[in-house]
Image (tube, helix red, strand yellow):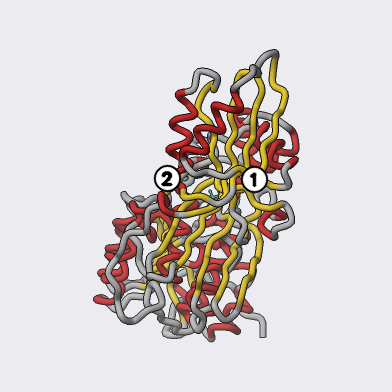
C-alpha cells in the first residue's frame, strides 16, 4: 500500500507523529524532502504517519525550493517546545549555545522527544541533557551528529555494546580531509585550497571550527563517551591542520605516509582514556590513508571483534538527512536508549594528558646547509633520549634545506622539549613541525 505524504497537523491523529523542524538549512530542507519521498516506506516501518506540523528558521522569505505553506511558522524556535500539537522536535539549527540549546532544553522539559544533528551541543552539554531526558522521560537522539551517513552512534552504542572497545576514532571532518587531499594532489598552499573550498561551498566562510579541529573533537568526544565513559570535553588535546604545508605532504609521501586529521580515543589498562585530535602521518597502505576528499572514516578495535574501518560521506543533504530519518524511525518504533547507552550514570573524568603518550614522530626543520648543523640537531635529540629511525634532506633554496626526521617511539613530552631546544639553535629557522605517526589504524 502506498501512503500519501502527510504534512499538515490537520491530518494528525492518534496514529500520527507530529514533527517540528527548527533550522531550514541544507539538512532541515533535506529532511523535509526525504520525509516526502519516503512517506510510504516510513509508514510501513513505523505503522504511523509522520506529519511535519511546524517549522522555524531565521528567514521566512528565503527561497528554499520547498513548499512551506502547510506548516505553522515560528519566528522563535524555542516556542516550538510549548506547542502541544508537536510530539518531536528536530533541532537542526546548530551551535552549542543560543537558540539550539534553549530549544533542546525547553523541549525535553516539556516532555517532547528531540532529534538533533548538533555535535557541539551533545559533546559540551551531554551530561545536563541526559539528565533532562531522564527526568522528563523525553528521548534524545543524535545519530546525525557524528560522521553524517556513517551510522557511527549506532555502531558504537548498539552494535559494539557486547565488546570491549580498545580504540575508537577516525577521520571525522570532511573539510579538513578535502583540504589535505587537495593540497597533496595539487601542491597548492593551505590558504589557497581553503579559499577555493570556500568559493565552491565545501568549506564554511568561518572555517575555524573545522580546520582547528573542534568539529572533530566534538564528534570524538561523543564516540569516546559512548565507547568508554564520559570525558570532560576541555581535557581533550585538540590541534588542527593550519601548520601542515604542501611540502610536508610531499615529504610524508616520499617516506610512505599520508597526512590525515585524526580524532582518536583509547582506553589504557589502568582505565585512563587518551583522547586527542591532531594531524597524523598514517602509513599509506593503512585503510584510513585510502579515505580521501570529503569522505569520513570510523575506525575501531574491539577486544573480541578486532579492528574495523568503514568510510562514507560525513556531511551534505542526503547523508545527514538520512541519518536524521533513522532517528525519527527509532523514535516512532519506540526505541528508547540512555544517551551514552548506559543506564548507570558515570561521572565525567579527564582524558589523560598526551605528554606521556609514546609514538614515533615526524619532525620537519628548516636549517642552514652548513657543516655542524646535523651534529647540533643530533645532540638535542640525544639529550632528550630520542632515537632516530631515518633522516632525509630536501632542497629548499640556496644555503637552506628542509630536514625531515622520523623518530623511534618516544614520549610526547620529550619531543616537545626537543622542539623547543631545536628552535633555539641559530642554524634552525622557525618552529620545527612535530607530527605524530599513528600506525594503529
Ligand atoms: N563541517 C563538517 C565537516 C560537517 O566538514 O565534516 C558537519 O559536521
| Other residues around mark 1 within 10 Å, as few (<14) / some (14–19) / many (≥20) | few
Q: CA distance from mark 2 to mark 1?
A: 18 Å
Q: Quadrant of residue 195?
A: top right
- Residue 110 visible in rendering: yes
Determine whether the residue tagged by mark 2 lies in a helix, strand or loop.
helix
Q: Are marks 2 and 1 in contact (CB under 8 Å)?
A: no
Residue at label 2?
A: 413
At x 36% / y 52%, what residue is drawn?
A: 96
Residue 253, placed above or below residue 243: below
At x 43% / y 73%, what residue is drawn?
A: 18
Residue at label 1?
A: 389
At x 47% / y 64%, what residue is drawn?
A: 266
Residue 317, percent from left and from top: 60, 56
Q: Nearer the viewer, mark 2 or mark 1?
A: 1
Residue 85, percent from left and from top: 35, 72
Q: Give the mark nearer the N terminus: 2 vs 1.
A: 1
- The quarter of the rendered structure image containing the N terminus is bottom right
* Left or right of residue 186: residue 127: left
- Residue 196 visible in rendering: no
* Residue 407 badge: none
Amino acid at each position: 500500500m502506498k501512503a500519501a505524504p502527510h504534512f499538515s497537523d490537520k491530518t494528525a491523529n492518534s496514529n500520527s507523529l507530529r514533527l517540528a523542524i527548527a533550522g531550514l538549512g541544507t539538512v532541515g530542507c533535506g529532511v523535509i524532502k526525504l520525509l516526502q519521498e519516503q512517506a510510504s516506506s516510513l509508514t510501513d516501518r513505523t505503522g504511523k504517519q509522520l506529519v511535519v506540523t511546524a517549522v522555524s528558521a531565521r528567514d521566512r522569505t528565503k527561497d528554499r525550493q520547498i513548499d512551506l505553506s502547510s506548516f505553522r511558522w515560528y519566528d522563535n524556535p524555542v516556542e516550538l517546545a510549548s506547542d502541544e500539537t508537536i510530539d518531536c522536535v528536530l533541532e537542526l539549527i546548530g551551535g552549542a549555545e543560543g537558540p539550539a540549546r534553549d530549544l533542546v532544553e525547553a523541549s525535553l522539559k516539556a516532555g517532547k522527544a528531540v532529534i538533533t544533528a548538533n555535535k557541539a551541543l551533545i559533546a559540551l552539554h551531554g551530561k545536563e541533557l541526559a539528565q533532562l531526558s531522564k527526568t522528563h522521560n523525553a528521548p534524545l537522539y543524535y545519530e546525525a551528529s557524528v560522521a553524517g551517513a556513517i551510522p557511527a552512534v549506532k555502531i558504537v552504542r548498539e552494535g559494539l555494546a557486547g565488546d570491549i572497545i580498545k580504540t575508537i576514532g577516525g577521520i571525522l571532518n570532511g573539510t579538513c580531509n578535502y583540504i589535505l587531499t587537495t593540497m597533496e594532489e595539487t601542491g597548492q598552499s593551505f590558504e589557497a585550497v581553503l579559499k577555493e573550498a570556500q568559493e565552491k561551498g565545501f568549506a564554511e566562510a568561518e572555517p575555524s571550527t573545522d580546520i582547528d579541529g573542534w568539529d572533530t573533537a566534538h564528534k570524538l568526544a561523543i564516540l569516546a563517551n559512548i565507547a568508554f565513559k564520559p570525558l570532560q570535553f576541555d581535557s581533550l588535546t585538540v590541534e588542527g591542520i593550519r601548520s601542515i604545508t604542501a611540502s610536508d605532504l610531499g615529504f610524508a609521501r616520499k617516506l610512505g605516509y599520508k597526512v590525515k586529521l585524526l580524532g582518536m580515543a583509547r582506553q589504557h589498562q589502568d582505565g585512563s582514556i587518551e583522547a586527542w585530535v591532531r594531524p597524523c602521518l598514517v602509513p599509506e597502505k593503512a585503510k584510513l590513508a585510502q579515505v580521501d576528499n570529503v569522505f569520513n572514516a570510523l575506525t575501531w578495535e574491539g577486544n573480541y571483534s578486532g579492528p574495523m574501518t568503514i568510510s562514507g560521506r560525513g556531511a551534505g543533504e542526503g547523508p545527514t538527512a538520512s541519518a536524521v530519518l533513522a532517528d525519527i524511525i527509532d523514535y516512532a518504533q519506540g526505541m528508547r536508549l540512555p544517551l551514552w547507552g548506559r543506564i548507570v550514570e558515570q561521572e565525567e573524568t579527564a582524558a589523560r594528558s598526551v605528554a606521556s603518550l609514546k609514538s614515533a614522530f615526524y619532525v620537519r626543520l628548516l636549517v642552514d646547509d652548513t657543516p655542524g648543523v646535523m651534529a647540533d640537531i643530533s645532540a638535542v635529540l640525544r639529550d632528550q633520549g630520542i632515537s632516530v629511525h631515518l633522516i632525509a634532506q630536501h632542497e629548499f633554496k640556496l644555503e637552506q634545506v628542509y630536514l625531515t626526521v622520523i623518530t623511534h617511539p618516544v614520549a610526547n613530552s620529550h619531543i616537545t622539549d626537543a622542539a623547543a631546544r631545536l628552535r633555539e639553535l641559530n642554524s634552525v629557522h622557525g618552529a620545527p613541525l612535530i607530527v605524530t605517526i599513528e600506525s594503529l589504524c
